[in-house]
Image: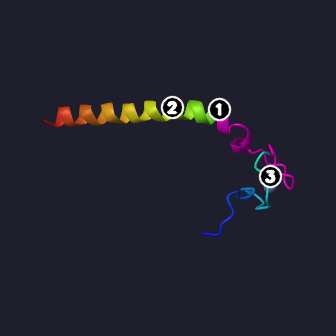
Amino acid sequence: MTAAPQTTPHCAVCGSPVASDAPRCPSCGLSRPAATGSKVLGRKGIWLMLAVLIAVYVVVLVIVAAAK
Ligand SMILES: [Zn+2]
Protein backbone atom coordinates (compact mmCIF):
# COMPACT_ATOMS: atom_id res chain seq x y z
CA MET A 1 0.00 0.00 0.00
CA THR A 2 1.58 3.25 -1.11
CA ALA A 3 -1.40 5.46 -0.47
CA ALA A 4 -0.64 8.68 1.31
CA PRO A 5 -1.90 8.72 4.91
CA GLN A 6 -3.54 12.11 4.52
CA THR A 7 -6.02 12.46 1.71
CA THR A 8 -7.04 15.89 0.58
CA PRO A 9 -10.79 16.24 0.84
CA HIS A 10 -12.63 17.56 -2.15
CA CYS A 11 -15.53 19.95 -2.28
CA ALA A 12 -18.84 18.16 -2.70
CA VAL A 13 -20.12 20.83 -5.07
CA CYS A 14 -17.26 21.91 -7.32
CA GLY A 15 -14.85 19.05 -6.66
CA SER A 16 -11.83 21.23 -6.04
CA PRO A 17 -9.39 20.13 -3.30
CA VAL A 18 -10.02 21.80 0.05
CA ALA A 19 -7.75 21.85 3.07
CA SER A 20 -9.06 19.51 5.76
CA ASP A 21 -9.21 22.36 8.29
CA ALA A 22 -10.71 24.93 5.93
CA PRO A 23 -14.19 25.93 7.03
CA ARG A 24 -15.17 26.89 3.49
CA CYS A 25 -14.35 25.85 -0.04
CA PRO A 26 -11.93 28.41 -1.52
CA SER A 27 -13.43 27.97 -4.96
CA CYS A 28 -17.20 28.09 -4.52
CA GLY A 29 -17.47 29.16 -0.85
CA LEU A 30 -19.46 26.14 0.26
CA SER A 31 -19.30 25.87 4.04
CA ARG A 32 -17.94 22.55 5.22
CA PRO A 33 -19.48 21.49 8.53
CA ALA A 34 -17.42 18.31 8.46
CA ALA A 35 -14.25 20.34 8.96
CA THR A 36 -15.44 22.42 11.89
CA GLY A 37 -18.11 20.26 13.46
CA SER A 38 -16.32 16.93 13.52
CA LYS A 39 -15.54 17.19 17.22
CA VAL A 40 -19.09 18.20 18.10
CA LEU A 41 -20.43 15.31 16.07
CA GLY A 42 -17.87 13.03 17.71
CA ARG A 43 -19.37 13.38 21.13
CA LYS A 44 -22.97 14.18 20.31
CA GLY A 45 -23.12 11.76 17.40
CA ILE A 46 -22.05 8.82 19.51
CA TRP A 47 -24.81 9.40 22.05
CA LEU A 48 -27.33 10.08 19.29
CA MET A 49 -26.35 6.87 17.53
CA LEU A 50 -26.53 4.96 20.83
CA ALA A 51 -30.00 6.36 21.50
CA VAL A 52 -31.17 5.37 18.03
CA LEU A 53 -29.75 1.88 18.45
CA ILE A 54 -31.52 1.46 21.79
CA ALA A 55 -34.75 2.79 20.31
CA VAL A 56 -34.55 0.35 17.40
CA TYR A 57 -33.76 -2.47 19.82
CA VAL A 58 -36.79 -1.63 21.98
CA VAL A 59 -39.04 -1.36 18.93
CA VAL A 60 -37.88 -4.76 17.69
CA LEU A 61 -38.46 -6.24 21.14
CA VAL A 62 -41.99 -4.84 21.24
CA ILE A 63 -42.75 -6.17 17.75
CA VAL A 64 -41.42 -9.61 18.61
CA ALA A 65 -43.32 -9.64 21.89
CA ALA A 66 -46.53 -8.54 20.18
CA ALA A 67 -46.22 -11.15 17.46
CA LYS A 68 -46.30 -14.02 19.91
ZN1 LIG B 1 -16.44 24.12 -3.86
* Discs 3/2, front: 3
Residue positioned most to the left? 68
Marks 1,2: beta carbons within 8 A: no
- Name the residue nearer the viewer: 15 or 6: 6
| Residue 34 is inside the magenta segment | yes
Q: Is residue 53 above or below residue 32?
A: above
Query: Residue 11, image x and y in percent?
Result: 75, 56
Query: Residue 57, image x and y in percent?
Result: 33, 35
Query: Residue 33, image x and y in percent?
Result: 71, 41
Task: Give the Cα distance between marks 3 and 2.
Answer: 28 Å
Task: Give the Cα distance between marks 1 and 3.
Answer: 19 Å
Of labels 1 and 2, earlier in sequence is 1
* Residue that label 2 marks: 48
Residue drawn at x 80%, y 52% is: 19
Residue 58: give its label: none
The N terminus - image quarter: bottom right
Residue positioned most to the front? 1
| Residue 59 is inside the magenta segment | no
Disc 3: CA contacts within 10 A as few (<14), some (14-19) or many (>=20): some
